[in-house]
Amino acid sequence: MSSFGDMHHVGITVRDLEASLAWYERIFGVKPEFVAHGSGPGLSQALGVPGAYLRFAFLRFGGSVIELLCYDNDREETFTRSNADVGTAHVCIDVPDLQAAYRDLLGKGVECLAPPLLIEDGPLEGCSFVYLKDPDGITLELFQTPDGKEHP
């Protein structure tokens, strides 16, 4: 059986790479490690996108990477999936102080789905989280594990 290592990155397709890079820098203070592009028949076949031409960037959040991809191909422009829809995903970012991060988000004009929620029972008891959307409607989660608690 094959062995697998750590997760390398999570990819998110965006409408406008430059606008998304500016938003992630303004909101989270992250800058791209690099910005590149790709095209060609091999890439088109590997991605399952005929005539694929894309630009992409890697944003590092501690030990994790979010890859933002922007295809210059025909595509659906609006992401309208519910968090309950099969196939919908979200990216979760650890924060040391969720209340401070929440206030910072509000101060930057970010709309959260609801105020932070404290988990009161179960394996995540004592942890708290808040959901928000990026400019393309992608769900992001900020998550705080209380001091002294083993990270789930």
Image (cartoon, rainbow, N blue to C red):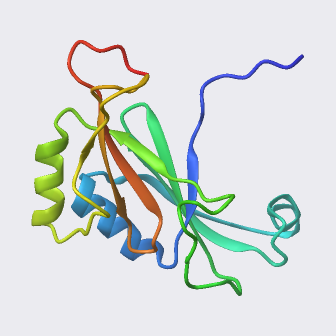
Looking at the figure, which quarter contains the N terminus?
top right
At horizontal 88% and vertical 64% (from top left) the residue drawn is: 45
Label tally:
0
Q: Quadrant of residue 106?
A: bottom left
Q: Can you say whether 97 is above or below 80 in the image?
A: above
Q: Is residue 45 left or right of residue 82?
A: right
Q: Quadrant of residue 54?
A: bottom right
At horizontal 24% and vertical 52% (from top left) the residue drawn is: 29
Q: Can you say whether 29 is above or below 40 in the image?
A: above
State the image coordinates of residue 68 (x, y, percent, origin top left): 51, 60
Looking at the figure, which quarter contains the C terminus?
top left
Q: Nearer the viewer, residue 87 or 50?
A: 87
Q: Is residue 8 left or right of residue 132?
A: right
Q: Nearer the viewer, residue 120 or 80?
A: 120
At horizontal 32% and vertical 35% (from top left) the residue drawn is: 119
Q: Is residue 60 left or right of residue 67?
A: left
State the image coordinates of residue 126 (x, y, percent, origin top left): 27, 26
State the image coordinates of residue 62 (x, y, percent, origin top left): 36, 34
Q: Is residue 52 left or right of residue 11?
A: right
At horizontal 70% and vertical 83% (from top left) the residue drawn is: 73
